[in-house]
Image (cartoon, coloured by chain):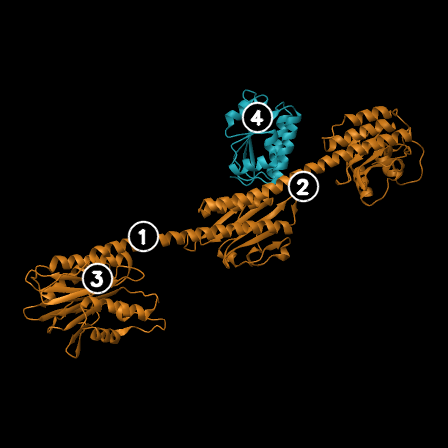
């Protein structure tokens, strides 16, 4: 795992984007994700999947930034999902309330299906 | 709530003539705009909406809105685009508690005036939107409201809205804080569960380090612990770069260590590549086992906050968890080792049980009795009796160096050798011992050896021939005399090609031969006094008239009485042979 977070963006379709993170979701890491997410929201994307397979650690500042991203996605009428979280991070997201408004999936495919409305 | 009296206050400068109005005041429309703002919204967007409503309510053409908790810069502007230097001057003026001077007002609301034309004097209004003693926002309008009474209600509405929004923000913050505390507790609970569920200290160390960094919003962390596998090995875990290294880290003070400035640092942390450090010693049973250090607690603004007493408490909890994990691993290792030793003892006991005679045979010319009392560990002593094909009787007592399974296996080897070589009687004792010695040298461990007293009694001649290879002297009680049959050479298995002299003694009816292992004569009491040969000889002499079985039992009883429960470290063996 990288200690300076990197974000790789994939666009499965025009309104959906997958953000693959690699590193610590802290203040700097969260800002990197927010920068990428907001840039995508400005181009018509409103369905975001955050693939955290290569992220093993997250702190409360990173979580607050993720909540801000989630609020913006919901404001735009979109959806946000997470996939491939470590058990610790998944539990953290549950406790911190992220799982109330975003869905968590074990893998990318079911997450993308949910984002597209193919599965509930 | 907003103070309508203060809403029209003019900050700074002499009274100025009203600025030209370019907008129509519409308090009703202003209320409608305020009512349309979503109270769940936060940030600059809300202030921009509030500013717009107040401009409409006042009929002002330009306005600025500031968050007094922010850096002092306006976060929203309406109908005006002040230059950066004017905004900086405004921030400075407000920070210093000064009002808005006419020049500053012109710079903010009529930036083009500096180009030459005489500036139009503006009656700039700074309107604080308050809730109780707290100022929620400052709104600057470029002129007084057309209808101060109606505008006061707009101001009150705006202040009320911001108060609700601020309260909602605080509730969210409190909710976040509450969830964070739950997360903190859950993390500690999870580490506790992990400790109970695994003995993998390596993965537990990873878990403890990442949870510490995560919960304390640290940028970096290093965990160093030793004695993970019982061999004193040092385990190093780091995230964000090693803060220190080597076993020197274990020399840190035992107490929690907090260094928010470089001057507070000591020892090896002096040059740690971080701004602010927090360290917790990992101590178990008074022993320093490791150090957990986190560095640079980040904040939302991108800066680094000081470590606090609450942070120290959390880190110390994780340090304690690490200590418990190490202690658990150590206890587990000890339990495994204890189990291994117990299994070995059971195995050795099983081997010995198959080797030591259950009962001694009746042989011509002798009455035999004997026994063995294993002490803490089994496998050290051996005794046996061999009725030979030619009518003679051979018997022996041996004591193997070492304990446990290795000793039991060596006894087993001696037992096998003797049972192969002795029964047919076609041997000379010296040659027999030489062959057994050669076999042990060839097939047993370098450092293992056996003391052996082996004898052959011929009823026809009443002669006892014997070899004493490093064993305790045999004792013969004959008439009133006591004859010792001393060692004639090294124990067997110790050196190659050794020769042992063969001795002989004639046993008259009633004469008693006492063979024993040093577990009898070297048994100690609480004062560390040995039972000794003198007591053994006296016992044998007193009980010589007893049946040998009873005498044997009385010797064991006397040794037990002497030692009175003091732990003994040698097996005890006695073999008695009385001529009849």
**Chain A's colour?**
cyan
**Horizontal placement of B404 versus B467: left or right?**
right
CB under 8 Å between discs 2 and 4: no
Q: Chain of mark 4?
A: A
Location of residue B8 in the rendering, given as x and y in whole percent from the top left corner: 89, 35
Labels 3 and 4 within one chain: no
Q: Chain of mark 1?
A: B
**Residues under labels 3 and 4: Cα distance?**
81 Å
Q: Quadrant of residue B48?
A: top right
**Residues under labels 2 and 3: Cα distance?**
81 Å
CB under 8 Å between discs 2 and 3: no
CB under 8 Å between discs 3 and 4: no
Labels 2 and 3 within one chain: yes
Few, some or many residues within 10 Å of mark 3 (<14, 14–19, 20+): many
CB under 8 Å between discs 4 and 1: no
> Who's the residue at 74% across and 28% down the image?
B38
Labels 1 and 3 within one chain: yes
**Chain B's colour?**
orange
**Horizontal placement of B97 versus A76: left or right?**
right
Residue found at the very far bottom of the displayed protein: B480
Few, some or many residues within 10 Å of mark 1 (<14, 14–19, 20+): few
Is A80 or B122 nearer to us in this picture? A80
Q: Which residue is tagged 1?
A: B343
Q: Chain of mark 2?
A: B
Tell me, yes or no, if residue B472 can be seen here: yes
Q: Which residue is tagged 3?
A: B382
């Amino acid at each position: 795992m990288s200690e300076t977070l990197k974000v790789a963006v994939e666009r499965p379709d025009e309104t959906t984007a997958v953000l693959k993170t690699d590193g610590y979701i802290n203040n700097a890491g969260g800002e990197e994700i927010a920068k990428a997410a907001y840039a995508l929201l400005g181009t018509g994307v409103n369905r975001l999947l955050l693939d955290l397979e290569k992220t093993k650690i997250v702190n409360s500042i990173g979580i607050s930034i993720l909540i801000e991203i989630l609020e913006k996605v919901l404001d735009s009428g979109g959806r946000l999902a997470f996939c491939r979280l470590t058990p610790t991070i998944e539990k953290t997201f549950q406790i911190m309330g992220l799982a109330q408004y975003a869905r968590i999936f074990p893998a990318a495919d079911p997450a993308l299906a949910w984002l597209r409305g193919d599965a509930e | 709530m907003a103070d309508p009296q203060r809403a029209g206050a003019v900050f700074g400068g002499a009274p100025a003539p009203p600025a030209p109005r370019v907008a129509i005041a519409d308090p009703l429309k202003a209320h409608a705009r305020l009512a349309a703002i979503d109270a769940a919204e936060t940030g600059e967007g809300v202030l921009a909406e509030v500013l717009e409503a107040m401009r409409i309510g006042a009929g002002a053409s330009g306005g600025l809105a500031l968050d007094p908790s922010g850096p002092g810069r306006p976060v929203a502007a309406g109908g005006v685009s002040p230059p950066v230097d004017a905004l900086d001057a405004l921030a400075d003026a407000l920070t210093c508690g000064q009002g808005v001077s006419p020049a500053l007002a012109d710079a903010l609301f009529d930036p083009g005036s500096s180009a030459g034309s005489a500036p139009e004097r503006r009656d700039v209004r700074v309107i604080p939107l308050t809730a109780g003693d707290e100022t929620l926002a400052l709104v600057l309008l470029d002129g007084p409201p057309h209808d101060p009474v109606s505008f006061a209600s707009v101001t009150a509405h705006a202040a009320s809205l911001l108060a609700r929004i601020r309260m909602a923000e605080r509730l969210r913050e409190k909710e976040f804080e509450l969830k964070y505390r739950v997360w903190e507790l859950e993390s500690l609970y999870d580490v506790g569960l992990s400790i109970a569920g695994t003995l993998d200290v390596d993965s537990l160390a990873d878990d403890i380090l990442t949870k510490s960094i995560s919960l304390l919003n640290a940028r970096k962390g290093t965990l160093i612990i030793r004695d993970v596998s019982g061999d004193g090995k040092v385990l190093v875990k780091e995230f964000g770069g090693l803060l220190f290294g080597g076993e020197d880290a274990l020399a840190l003070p035992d107490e929690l260590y907090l260094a928010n400035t470089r001057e507070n640092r000591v020892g090896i942390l002096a040059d740690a590549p971080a701004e602010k450090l927090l360290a917790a010693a990992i101590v178990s049973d008074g022993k320093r086992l490791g150090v957990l250090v986190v560095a640079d607690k980040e904040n939302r603004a991108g800066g680094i906050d000081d470590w606090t007493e609450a942070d120290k408490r959390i880190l110390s909890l994780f340090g304690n968890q690490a200590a418990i994990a190490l202690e658990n691993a150590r206890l587990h290792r000890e339990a495994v080792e204890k189990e291994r030793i117990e299994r070995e003892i059971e195995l050795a006991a099983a081997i010995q049980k198959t080797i030591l005679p259950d009962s001694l045979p009746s042989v011509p010319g002798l009455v035999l009795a004997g026994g063995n009392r294993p002490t803490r560990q089994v496998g050290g002593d051996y005794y046996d009796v061999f009725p030979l094909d030619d009518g003679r009787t051979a018997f022996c007592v041996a004591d193997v160096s070492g304990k446990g399974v290795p000793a039991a296996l060596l006894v087993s080897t001696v037992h096998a050798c003797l049972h192969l070589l002795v029964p047919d009687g076609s041997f000379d004792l010296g040659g027999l011992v030489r062959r057994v010695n050669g076999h042990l040298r060839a097939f047993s461990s370098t450092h293992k050896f056996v003391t052996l007293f082996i004898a052959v009694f011929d009823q026809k001649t009443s002669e006892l021939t014997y070899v004493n290879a490093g064993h305790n002297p045999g004792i013969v009680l004959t008439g009133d005399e006591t004859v010792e049959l001393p060692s004639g050479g090294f124990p067997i298995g110790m050196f190659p090609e050794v020769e042992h002299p063969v001795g002989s003694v004639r046993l008259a009816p009633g004469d008693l031969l006492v063979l024993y292992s040093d577990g009898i004569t070297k048994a100690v009491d609480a004062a560390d006094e040995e039972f000794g040969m003198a007591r053994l000889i006296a016992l044998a002499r007193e009980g010589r008239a007893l049946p040998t079985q009873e005498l044997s039992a009385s010797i064991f009883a006397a040794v037990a009485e002497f030692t009175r429960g003091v732990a003994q470290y040698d097996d005890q063996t006695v073999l008695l042979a009385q001529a009849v």
